[in-house]
Amino acid sequence: MASRTQDAEAADAAASLGLVRATRAHLADLLVTPWWYHPALGSVLGAFLLIQAVEPRATRYLFIVVWGFALEAVRRAYRRHTGVYRSALWMHGFPRGSARREAIAMLCVLCTLFLGAAALEGAAGRGEAPVIAGVLTLPCVVVLGRRLDRALREDLRTELGTDPGRRS
Amino acid sequence: MCALLAPVQEADFAVLREALGVSDSVLSKHLRVLEDAGYLALKKSTTGSRVRTRAALTPAGRRAYSAHVAELQRLIAGDSFTAPPSPAPT
Protein backbone atom coordinates (compact mmCIF):
# COMPACT_ATOMS: atom_id res chain seq x y z
CA MET A 1 0.00 0.00 0.00
CA ALA A 2 2.75 2.42 1.01
CA SER A 3 4.75 1.36 -2.06
CA ARG A 4 1.76 2.04 -4.33
CA THR A 5 1.34 5.49 -2.77
CA GLN A 6 5.03 6.18 -3.32
CA ASP A 7 4.76 4.99 -6.92
CA ALA A 8 1.78 7.28 -7.48
CA GLU A 9 3.62 10.20 -5.92
CA ALA A 10 6.69 9.48 -8.04
CA ALA A 11 4.53 9.33 -11.17
CA ASP A 12 2.89 12.68 -10.28
CA ALA A 13 6.30 14.17 -9.57
CA ALA A 14 7.65 12.91 -12.89
CA ALA A 15 4.68 14.45 -14.71
CA SER A 16 5.24 17.77 -12.93
CA LEU A 17 8.92 17.77 -13.80
CA GLY A 18 8.02 16.97 -17.39
CA LEU A 19 5.95 20.17 -17.42
CA VAL A 20 8.87 22.11 -15.95
CA ARG A 21 11.18 20.79 -18.68
CA ALA A 22 8.65 21.59 -21.41
CA THR A 23 8.26 25.12 -20.03
CA ARG A 24 12.01 25.67 -19.95
CA ALA A 25 12.30 24.39 -23.53
CA HIS A 26 9.60 26.85 -24.57
CA LEU A 27 11.51 29.63 -22.83
CA ALA A 28 14.65 28.59 -24.74
CA ASP A 29 12.71 29.22 -27.96
CA LEU A 30 11.55 32.63 -26.68
CA LEU A 31 15.05 33.75 -25.68
CA VAL A 32 16.44 33.82 -29.23
CA THR A 33 18.26 37.13 -29.22
CA PRO A 34 17.53 39.39 -32.21
CA TRP A 35 20.52 39.74 -34.55
CA TRP A 36 20.94 43.46 -33.80
CA TYR A 37 21.08 43.15 -30.01
CA HIS A 38 24.73 42.20 -29.43
CA PRO A 39 26.15 44.64 -32.00
CA ALA A 40 23.97 47.39 -30.48
CA LEU A 41 24.96 46.47 -26.93
CA GLY A 42 28.64 46.16 -27.84
CA SER A 43 28.56 49.55 -29.57
CA VAL A 44 26.94 51.22 -26.58
CA LEU A 45 29.33 49.62 -24.08
CA GLY A 46 32.33 50.46 -26.26
CA ALA A 47 31.07 54.02 -26.62
CA PHE A 48 31.42 54.46 -22.86
CA LEU A 49 35.18 54.03 -23.20
CA LEU A 50 35.39 56.28 -26.23
CA ILE A 51 33.51 58.97 -24.30
CA GLN A 52 36.36 59.06 -21.77
CA ALA A 53 38.48 60.81 -24.41
CA VAL A 54 35.98 63.67 -24.74
CA GLU A 55 37.05 67.06 -23.41
CA PRO A 56 36.11 69.27 -21.67
CA ARG A 57 34.85 67.24 -18.74
CA ALA A 58 31.40 68.90 -18.72
CA THR A 59 30.84 67.70 -22.29
CA ARG A 60 32.02 64.23 -21.29
CA TYR A 61 29.44 64.11 -18.51
CA LEU A 62 26.72 65.16 -20.94
CA PHE A 63 27.77 62.34 -23.26
CA ILE A 64 27.62 59.91 -20.34
CA VAL A 65 24.02 60.94 -19.62
CA VAL A 66 23.12 60.36 -23.27
CA TRP A 67 24.98 57.07 -23.09
CA GLY A 68 22.80 55.99 -20.17
CA PHE A 69 19.68 56.63 -22.21
CA ALA A 70 21.15 54.66 -25.13
CA LEU A 71 21.87 51.67 -22.89
CA GLU A 72 18.35 51.75 -21.50
CA ALA A 73 16.94 52.01 -25.04
CA VAL A 74 18.82 48.85 -26.09
CA ARG A 75 17.58 47.01 -23.01
CA ARG A 76 13.97 48.06 -23.59
CA ALA A 77 14.11 47.17 -27.28
CA TYR A 78 15.26 43.66 -26.34
CA ARG A 79 12.47 43.27 -23.85
CA ARG A 80 9.86 44.55 -26.33
CA HIS A 81 11.11 42.04 -28.87
CA THR A 82 11.18 38.96 -26.62
CA GLY A 83 8.68 39.82 -23.88
CA VAL A 84 11.13 38.63 -21.24
CA TYR A 85 14.21 40.15 -19.71
CA ARG A 86 17.37 38.84 -18.17
CA SER A 87 20.65 40.67 -17.92
CA ALA A 88 23.82 38.83 -18.92
CA LEU A 89 25.21 39.91 -15.56
CA TRP A 90 22.29 38.46 -13.58
CA MET A 91 24.20 35.59 -12.03
CA HIS A 92 21.23 34.48 -9.99
CA GLY A 93 19.72 33.06 -13.14
CA PHE A 94 22.69 30.78 -13.76
CA PRO A 95 22.65 28.21 -10.95
CA ARG A 96 24.66 25.68 -12.90
CA GLY A 97 25.73 24.81 -16.38
CA SER A 98 27.81 26.24 -19.15
CA ALA A 99 25.83 29.51 -19.24
CA ARG A 100 27.27 30.47 -15.86
CA ARG A 101 30.81 29.94 -17.14
CA GLU A 102 30.10 31.96 -20.28
CA ALA A 103 28.57 34.80 -18.24
CA ILE A 104 31.59 34.89 -15.93
CA ALA A 105 33.96 34.83 -18.91
CA MET A 106 32.11 37.74 -20.50
CA LEU A 107 32.18 39.70 -17.26
CA CYS A 108 35.93 39.06 -16.85
CA VAL A 109 36.72 40.13 -20.40
CA LEU A 110 34.68 43.35 -20.10
CA CYS A 111 36.18 44.17 -16.70
CA THR A 112 39.67 43.59 -18.12
CA LEU A 113 38.95 45.94 -21.03
CA PHE A 114 37.41 48.66 -18.89
CA LEU A 115 39.75 48.50 -15.92
CA GLY A 116 42.78 47.89 -18.08
CA ALA A 117 42.00 50.94 -20.18
CA ALA A 118 41.52 53.05 -17.08
CA ALA A 119 44.77 51.80 -15.56
CA LEU A 120 46.81 52.33 -18.74
CA GLU A 121 45.43 55.82 -19.22
CA GLY A 122 45.78 56.86 -15.59
CA ALA A 123 49.06 55.23 -14.59
CA ALA A 124 50.94 55.03 -17.87
CA GLY A 125 49.44 58.06 -19.59
CA ARG A 126 48.36 55.96 -22.56
CA GLY A 127 45.53 58.16 -23.79
CA GLU A 128 44.78 55.81 -26.68
CA ALA A 129 44.02 52.89 -24.31
CA PRO A 130 40.30 53.72 -23.79
CA VAL A 131 39.86 54.20 -27.53
CA ILE A 132 41.44 50.82 -28.35
CA ALA A 133 39.47 49.11 -25.56
CA GLY A 134 36.28 50.80 -26.76
CA VAL A 135 36.79 49.49 -30.28
CA LEU A 136 37.58 45.97 -29.00
CA THR A 137 34.45 45.92 -26.84
CA LEU A 138 32.12 45.56 -29.82
CA PRO A 139 33.53 42.26 -31.21
CA CYS A 140 33.98 40.90 -27.68
CA VAL A 141 30.34 41.50 -26.79
CA VAL A 142 29.14 40.07 -30.11
CA VAL A 143 31.21 36.87 -29.83
CA LEU A 144 30.84 36.29 -26.10
CA GLY A 145 27.21 37.39 -26.01
CA ARG A 146 26.23 34.90 -28.69
CA ARG A 147 28.16 32.13 -26.92
CA LEU A 148 26.30 33.00 -23.72
CA ASP A 149 22.96 32.88 -25.52
CA ARG A 150 23.66 29.45 -26.99
CA ALA A 151 24.84 28.14 -23.61
CA LEU A 152 21.78 29.57 -21.86
CA ARG A 153 19.36 27.96 -24.31
CA GLU A 154 21.23 24.66 -24.00
CA ASP A 155 21.03 24.84 -20.20
CA LEU A 156 17.31 25.63 -20.38
CA ARG A 157 16.74 22.54 -22.52
CA THR A 158 18.88 20.14 -20.52
CA GLU A 159 18.96 21.36 -16.90
CA LEU A 160 16.24 21.97 -14.35
CA GLY A 161 17.93 25.09 -13.04
CA THR A 162 18.09 23.93 -9.42
CA ASP A 163 20.50 21.97 -7.31
CA PRO A 164 18.65 18.71 -6.47
CA GLY A 165 20.73 18.26 -3.34
CA ARG A 166 19.96 21.68 -1.92
CA ARG A 167 17.55 21.95 0.97
CA SER A 168 15.44 25.11 1.41
CA MET B 1 4.28 29.84 -14.31
CA CYS B 2 7.18 29.75 -11.90
CA ALA B 3 9.15 27.51 -14.25
CA LEU B 4 8.77 30.24 -16.86
CA LEU B 5 9.71 33.07 -14.50
CA ALA B 6 12.57 31.40 -12.61
CA PRO B 7 15.21 31.67 -15.38
CA VAL B 8 14.42 35.31 -16.18
CA GLN B 9 14.26 38.56 -14.23
CA GLU B 10 10.80 39.43 -15.52
CA ALA B 11 8.30 38.50 -18.20
CA ASP B 12 5.42 40.29 -19.88
CA PHE B 13 1.84 39.34 -19.09
CA ALA B 14 1.24 38.52 -22.77
CA VAL B 15 4.21 36.13 -22.87
CA LEU B 16 2.95 34.29 -19.79
CA ARG B 17 -0.56 34.08 -21.19
CA GLU B 18 0.59 32.67 -24.52
CA ALA B 19 3.07 30.25 -22.97
CA LEU B 20 0.52 28.91 -20.48
CA GLY B 21 -2.40 28.95 -22.93
CA VAL B 22 -4.86 30.53 -20.49
CA SER B 23 -7.18 33.51 -20.62
CA ASP B 24 -6.38 36.95 -19.20
CA SER B 25 -8.71 36.44 -16.26
CA VAL B 26 -7.29 33.02 -15.32
CA LEU B 27 -3.75 34.33 -15.52
CA SER B 28 -4.60 37.46 -13.52
CA LYS B 29 -6.15 35.32 -10.82
CA HIS B 30 -3.10 33.09 -10.51
CA LEU B 31 -0.74 36.05 -10.56
CA ARG B 32 -2.71 37.65 -7.74
CA VAL B 33 -2.54 34.47 -5.65
CA LEU B 34 1.23 34.29 -6.06
CA GLU B 35 1.58 38.00 -5.35
CA ASP B 36 -0.50 37.69 -2.17
CA ALA B 37 1.74 34.81 -1.09
CA GLY B 38 4.79 37.02 -1.54
CA TYR B 39 6.20 34.89 -4.35
CA LEU B 40 5.61 37.35 -7.18
CA ALA B 41 5.97 41.06 -7.84
CA LEU B 42 3.86 42.76 -10.48
CA LYS B 43 4.98 45.95 -12.20
CA LYS B 44 2.75 48.04 -14.40
CA SER B 45 3.94 50.62 -16.90
CA THR B 46 2.09 52.75 -19.41
CA THR B 47 3.21 52.98 -23.02
CA GLY B 48 0.96 55.48 -24.76
CA SER B 49 -2.54 54.26 -23.98
CA ARG B 50 -1.46 50.69 -23.23
CA VAL B 51 -0.78 49.37 -19.78
CA ARG B 52 1.90 46.70 -19.74
CA THR B 53 2.13 44.31 -16.83
CA ARG B 54 5.33 42.48 -16.02
CA ALA B 55 5.80 39.71 -13.51
CA ALA B 56 8.92 38.77 -11.62
CA LEU B 57 9.53 36.13 -8.97
CA THR B 58 10.55 37.51 -5.57
CA PRO B 59 13.49 35.95 -3.71
CA ALA B 60 10.95 34.04 -1.59
CA GLY B 61 9.25 32.85 -4.75
CA ARG B 62 12.52 31.62 -6.20
CA ARG B 63 13.34 29.73 -3.00
CA ALA B 64 9.90 28.16 -2.89
CA TYR B 65 10.10 27.12 -6.53
CA SER B 66 13.60 25.65 -6.15
CA ALA B 67 12.51 23.73 -3.07
CA HIS B 68 9.45 22.45 -4.92
CA VAL B 69 11.53 21.19 -7.87
CA ALA B 70 14.03 19.62 -5.48
CA GLU B 71 11.22 17.78 -3.68
CA LEU B 72 9.84 16.52 -7.00
CA GLN B 73 13.27 15.15 -7.87
CA ARG B 74 13.59 13.46 -4.49
CA LEU B 75 10.14 11.89 -4.89
CA ILE B 76 11.21 10.44 -8.21
CA ALA B 77 14.48 9.20 -6.74
CA GLY B 78 12.51 7.52 -3.96
CA ASP B 79 14.20 9.47 -1.12
CA SER B 80 12.22 9.87 2.08
CA PHE B 81 11.02 13.37 3.00
CA THR B 82 13.33 15.45 5.12
CA ALA B 83 10.98 18.43 5.32
CA PRO B 84 7.35 19.12 4.48
CA PRO B 85 6.96 20.10 0.84
CA SER B 86 6.73 23.81 0.17
CA PRO B 87 3.44 25.29 -1.12
CA ALA B 88 3.43 24.26 -4.72
CA PRO B 89 3.68 27.23 -7.09
CA THR B 90 3.03 26.01 -10.62
Image (tube, grey):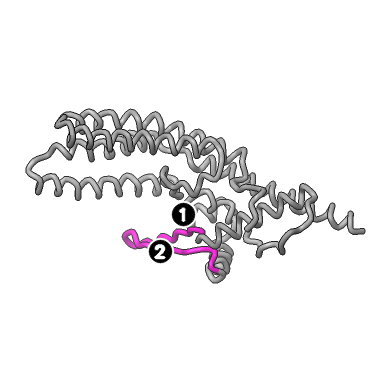
Most common SS among magenta residues: strand
On screen, residue B50 versus residue A54, left or right, reads right
Q: Residue at x 35, y 47 (%)?
A: A75
Q: Which residues are magenta?
A: B38-57
Quarter occupied by the N terminus of chain A: bottom right
Q: Is residue B41 magenta?
A: yes
Q: Amino acid at mark 2?
A: Lys
* Circle 2 residue: B44
Q: Amino acid at mark 1?
A: Glu
On screen, residue A80 versus residue A67, left or right, reads right
Question: Helix, strand, or loop for circle 1?
Answer: strand
Whether residue A11 can be seen here: no
Question: Helix, strand, or loop for circle 2?
Answer: strand
Q: Nearer the viewer, residue A88 or A17?
A: A88
Query: Residue under mark 2: which chain is it in?
Result: B
Whether residue A99 can be seen here: yes
Q: Residue at x 54, y 62 (%)?
A: B60
Residue A32 placement (x, y as % from top left): 47, 38
Foreground: disc 1 or disc 2: 1
Q: Residues within 10 Å of mark 2 (few under 14, many from 20)?
A: few
Q: Residue furthest front?
A: A123
Quarter occupied by the C terminus of chain A: bottom right
Q: Nearer the viewer, residue B51 or B72?
A: B72
Residue A134 placement (x, y as % from top left): 24, 33
Q: Is residue A91 above or below residue B58?
A: above
* Circle 1 residue: B10
Q: Residue at x 22, y 28 (%)?
A: A132
Q: Decide which of tag 1 and tag 2 comes sooner along the chain.
A: 1
Q: Is residue A153 magenta?
A: no
Q: Nearer the viewer, residue A147 or B52?
A: A147
Say which quarter of the image contains residue A110. top left
Query: Residue under mark 1: which chain is it in?
Result: B
